[in-house]
Amino acid sequence: VQREIAYVSPLEGYPGFLEEAKYYMTQTKANKEQQQGMVKNILRTVCGPAVPPVYRTFMAPWPWSPFFTALFTPPFFKFLVGPNRWALRNDEALGGVYVERCRFLEETGCKGLCLNLCKIPTQEFFRETLGMDV
């Protein structure tokens, strides 16, 4: 995040991350497309060049991919979204994740930050880059 936005919060850890998100949204005057693009760039960087084609080939086209993807969410993303657990999807199949109260939304208190720096770009990244709707 710090490399993408060219700002480093004096706060450490999660509070610093939240401050950097707020800074990016309020001080850079980035529009929603730029905000979402920044997050997708970070996700591409984190995945590296090998993960998207492997995921698209061995995970995305198969019916079990939402289930296996959901297995990783609770333990690895609790720091970002707070308490979450495995759940059924809207179609009653395995592979859903239920976020009890989103930590990012609660602590920023801003729906725009939630939508443009988390929800929308993550959904678009999974659909466009990894080939799976979430």
Image (cartoon, rainbow, N blue to C red):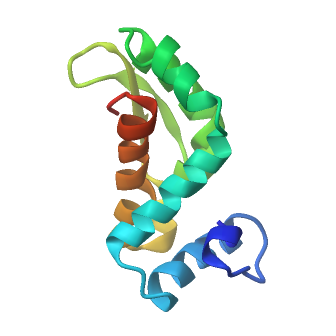
> Who's the residue at 44% across and 56% down the image?
118
> Who's the residue at 53% across and 80% down the image?
24
Residue nearest the observer in this picture, 66 or 74: 66
Q: Is residue 77 above or below residue 66?
A: below
Residue reaching furthest to the bottom: 27
Q: Is residue 120 above or below residue 21?
A: above
- Residue 115 visible in rendering: yes
Residue reaching furthest to the left: 91
Q: Is residue 104 above or below residue 52?
A: below
From the viewer's perspective, tell me whether residue 126 is left or right of residue 1.
Answer: left
From the viewer's perspective, tell me whether residue 41 is left or right of residue 48.
Answer: left
**In which quadrant of the rendered view does residue 93 lie?**
top left
Q: x and y percent of residue 47 in the render?
A: 63, 39
Q: How many marks?
A: 0
Quadrant in the picture for the C terminus:
top left
Residue nearest the observer in this picture, 93 or 130: 130
> Who's the residue at 49% across and 30% down the image?
85
Residue nearest the observer in this picture, 121 or 83: 121
